[in-house]
Image (spheres, rainbow, N blue to C red):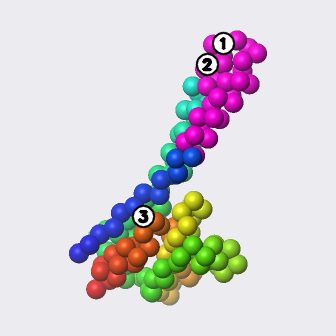
């Protein structure tokens, strides 16, 4: 039975921005002296890098009959049809087609997504929107675990 695992890592440009944030803090602290400036560069870069790493640490997995996406763990039996979304449809489902009750694992830097209906009558969530670089692979893994 094929399983699926993906980590929604932040793009490389975000890491450059994290370093630039540290350099900016160092320049702000430059009037206080060289040591505060160096501490600002190191500390600011470290804090910004930690924020980028935390944001990019979300994982989507299909394991042991469950879809694990971020903090959610949903049994595959409670999932309905999966719809692969190209870049245009993904934008539509995150904006004007979106339902506020939906569970979103949204990363705007990932253009494609998968929308999976929730069929559990006790769950008010209509669907799960998952940003993914391989929506077809995720849909295949979900259907393989369903049967």
Please report the bounds of the magenta region as a residue range: 14-41
Find residue 147 and report its image quarter.
bottom left
- Disc number for residue 120: none
Q: Is mark 1 on a helix, strand or loop?
A: helix
Q: Is mark 2 on a helix, strand or loop?
A: helix
Q: State the quadrant of the N terminus.
A: bottom left
CA neighbours of label 2 inside 10 A, class few (<14), some (14 to 19), many (20+): some
Residue 53 drawn in magenta: no
How far across and how far down the image is residue 12, in percent?
A: 52, 47
How far across and how far down the image is residue 64, in percent?
A: 29, 70
Nearest to viewer (mark 1 / mark 3): 1
From the viewer's perspective, tell me whether residue 85 is left or right of residue 136.
right
Marks 3 and 2, the one that precedes in the sequence: 2
- Disc number for residue 38: 2
Quickly name the residue at label 3: 60
Which residue is rendered at x = 69% and y = 30% of the image? 24
Which residue is rendered at x = 63% and y = 73% of the image? 91
Quickly name the residue at label 1: 34
- Callout 2 touching callout 1 (CB < 8 Å): yes
Q: From mark 1 to mark 3, how far is it between C-alphas?
A: 44 Å
């Amino acid at each position: 039975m094929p399983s699926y695992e993906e980590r929604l890592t932040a793009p490389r440009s975000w890491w450059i921005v994290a370093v630039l944030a540290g350099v900016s803090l160092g320049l702000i602290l430059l009037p206080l002296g060289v040591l505060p400036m160096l501490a600002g560069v190191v500390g600011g870069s470290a804090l910004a890098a930690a924020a980028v790493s935390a944001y990019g640490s979300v994982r989507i997995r299909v394991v042991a009959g469950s879809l694990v996406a971020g903090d959610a763990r949903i049994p595959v039996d409670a999932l309905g049809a999966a719809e692969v979304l190209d870049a245009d449809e993904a934008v539509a489902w995150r904006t004007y087609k979106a339902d506020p009750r939906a569970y979103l694992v949204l990363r705007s830097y990932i253009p494609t997504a998968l929308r999976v209906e929730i069929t559990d009558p006790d769950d008010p969530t209509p669907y799960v929107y998952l940003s993914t670089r391989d929506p077809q692979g995720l849909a295949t893994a979900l259907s393989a675990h369903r049967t």
